[in-house]
Image (cartoon, coloured by chain):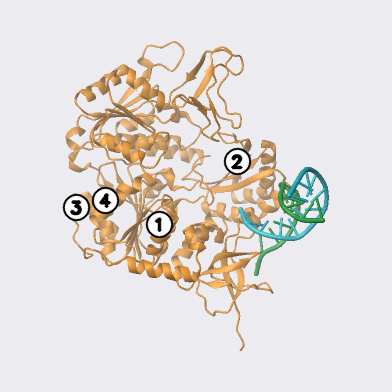
Chain colours: A orange, B cyan, C green
Amino acid sequence: MQVDLVTVAVAVETPQHTGLGAPLDYASTAPGLPPGTLVRVPLGRREVPGIVWERPPGDAPPELKPVREVLASLPPLGDSWRQLVGFAAAYYQRGLGELALAVLPPELRKLDDVQLTRRIARLHRAEAPPAAAPGDPLHGPALNDEQRAAVEAIGAAPGTYLLHGVTGSGKTEVYLHAAEAALAAGRQVLVMVPEINLTPQLEARFAERFAGRRLVSLHSGLTPAQRLRHWMLAHLGAADLVLGTRLAVFASLPRLGLIVADEEHDPSFKQQEGARYSARDLAVYRGHVEGVPVVLGSATPSLETWQRVLEGRYRRLALPQRIGGGVLPRVRLFDMNTLPRQRGSAGPALAPPLVQAIAERIERGEQSLLFLNRRGYAPVLHCTACGWKSGCPHCSAWRVFHKGDRSLRCHHCGFTERVPRACPDCGNLDIAPLGRGTERLEEQIAELLPGARVARIDADTTRTKGSLEAQLGAVHAGDVDVLVGTQMIAKGHDFRRITLVAAVNPDSALFASDFRAPERLFSLLMQAAGRAGRDAEQAARSEMWVQTWHPRHTLYAALRRHDYEAFAAGQLEERLAAGLPPFASLALLRAEAREAAVAQAFLRAAAERVQAQAESMGVTIYPPVPPPVARVADVDRMQMLVESPTRGALQRLLAGWLPQMHTLRAQHKGVLRWAVDVDPLAI
DNA sequence: AGCACGCCGACT
DNA sequence: GTCGGCGTGCTC
C-alpha cells in the first residue's frame, strides 16, 4: 500500500544563537495535521517535543525526517495562542520553538500520547461538576458610582483600560465584577499579579467569591505536576479563572474573555532572563488579538501606560476615593538637615520626632511600618586605619555585612566569608560598618524604643517556605509593634492596624543613573503609604514619614499631595527632552567575557555591521559601556544601547541584525554569552 | 543547548 | 591497551 507523505513545519527547541530560529520541516504520514498539534520529532541524534506550525510557502529540504509521534489526545494549541507566541518570539528576538516550548509546562514535554491520554481522562474524572451552580449572584459589597461605571465600561467593549486608583480604592472589587460578567458570558478570565507572594490572597478572594467556578493558579512556585494539571485545565477549557504571575500570560485559554494585570507598573512583569518579555505588554497584545478587554490596574501607572492614556489609546477608569471614606495618610517630609550633625557616620537611623511618633503609636496599641530598601546589617565594612573596604573578590560590588551569622556576603554572586576579626590589609582591629540595612535598623529601634516588639521582614527572614505567612500572621495578630522591612512589605499585603509608615532612607533613588529610578521610587512610596490607614476610622490619624535631605525635591512635593498626575507630567517632560521611553524605543545588547575588552570588541564589531543602516533609519547605536555592576562572578559585562524613534524601525533593524550575531561571535573567541533585551527596564 | 565525533594522558 | 579530557561542529 502506498503511504502519502506530507511536509509539516514543526517548532522545536533550537536555541537561537545556532541560527535556527524558524520551524523545521518534517515528513508526516498523517495528512492534515492541524497547526498547534504537539508532536515528537528527531533532531540530530535526539528526539524532542515540537509543535506543528503554519508552513511559510517555499521549498522544503530534499531529505526529510519523519514525525515520530503525534500526541493526538491533546487538543491543538489555538490560533490566537500561536499568534501570541509568534509575536512574542519576533518582538523579543528569540527562536519561535524555543519560546513556544519554554512557555509550556515542563512536565508536558516528557509525556507520550498514552500517558497523556491517561492524564486527561483522570482530569475529567477528578474534576466533578462544581459544588454550587454557576451564576450565583455576587455577594460582595455594593459598588460605588465609579466602580460601577468602570465595570460597565469594561463590559461594553474590548480595548485596554487603565483602572487608576490608590490602595483601598476598590480595584479588586472591579476585577471581581468584570470577571463575573465575563464568566456569565461563558468565557475564561486571566488575572495576573506581579509576584508569587501575592497569589494566595488573590486566590482566596476569588475563590470565596466564585465558589461555583473552577479556579486554578499558574506560577513557578507550583510543583511540576500541579503546573501541568492547572495548565491542562485551562487548555481544556475546564478552568474558568486562571490566576498567576507573568508566565500565565502564555496560558492556553480557548474561551478567553477578560485579562487583568494588577499593579501593571510593577517591574516584575518583565521577565529578566531567557526571552525577556513584558507580560503586561503581551497581555495588551493578546487582548487585541482575541478582541477581549484588558484591564491594567495601578495607583501609579507606568509612564508607558500613562502616555497611552494621554494619547487616547487606553481608556482611563478612575477610582478617586478610598472605600469607606478613608483618606490617604498625611505625608510628612522630615528634613534631615535640621538634625545636629554627628561626627563621622550616617547620623541617627530615625529622627527624634519620628521616634516620638512611633512611641505614641505603641502606646495606643497601633502599629508602625519602617521601610528601608537594603537588607543586611550594613552595605559595606571599612577599616578606619587604612581605608580597606569589604569588596567582593569576584565582582565589582561591596560585600554586605550580615551580623546575624557574622558573614560578609556578596548579593551578586553569593560569595560568603566570615567577617574578618581584623583588617585583611593592615591588621587594624577597628573595622566598622558603613551605612545601614534592615538588620541594623531593627537593632537600633530596639535601642531607641526599649520594650517595643520589633519584627523584620526581608529576603533573609523569609527564606524558608511559610515563614513570610507566619510573620505576616504575627503582624495581623497584633504581636508586633514595629515592622521593619524591604520593599517586600510595601507590596499588596493588607495590614489593618498600621497608622504610621516611614521611609527611612529613600533619597538614593533620587539621583540614581537609572532613568526609571524616580518612577519606581514614587510608586514604591505611594504603595507604602497605602499600607497605612486602611481602616477608615484610623485613616484620619495615619501618617507617612519620609526622612530626606532633599525635602524640596519635586518628587516628594508630588508625593505629599498624592499627586500622581503632576509627577507623571514632570517625568514625561524629562523623558521627551531626553529621547527616552515612552517617546523612544530601546534595546540593549549585552555581552559577557572574562575580559571586558573582549565583550567590548564584540559589541563594537556588531555595531559596525549595521551602523550605516541604523543611521538611515534614524536609529542610534551608542558605544558599549559597562553596566552599573560591571563584573559578576569573575565575568565582565558590557552593554550597548540601541535607541529608535519608533518600535517599527527598531524591530526591522534587530530582525536583520541578530541573525548575523552568531557568525560574528565565532570570530570573537572568549565571548561567553550575549543577549538582547528589547524594552529593557534599566539601562 | 545537547550530543556527537575526535584525537591525546593516567588507569583496571 | 582503554576510559575520558573538553575542542569543534551539527541539528529539517
Q: Residue A359 carries which label?
A: none
Which numbered disc, 3 or 1, marks the residue closer to the eye? Answer: 1
Name the residue carrying label 2: A639
Q: In the rendering, at what x and y percent does residue A549 appear? A: 40, 21
Which kind of residue does numbered mark 1 sit on? Gln
Name the residue carrying label 4: A205
Which numbered disc, 4 or 1, marks the residue closer to the eye? Answer: 1
> In the rendered structure, the residue with mark 4 lies on which chain?
A
Is label 3 in a helix, a strand or a loop? loop
How far, Cα to Cα, is label 2 from label 1? 38 Å
Q: Do labels 3 and 1 share a chain?
A: yes
Asked if disc 2 and disc 4 are in contact, CB closer than 8 Å, the reply is no
Which kind of residue does numbered mark 2 sit on? Gln
Name the residue carrying label 1: A226
Which kind of residue does numbered mark 4 sit on? Arg
Disc nearer the start of the sequence (2/4): 4
Disc nearer the start of the sequence (3/1): 3
* Residue ID at (41%, 49%): A221
Q: Is residue A45 left or right of residue A461?
A: right
Where, by quadrant of the figure, is residue A540 drawn?
top left
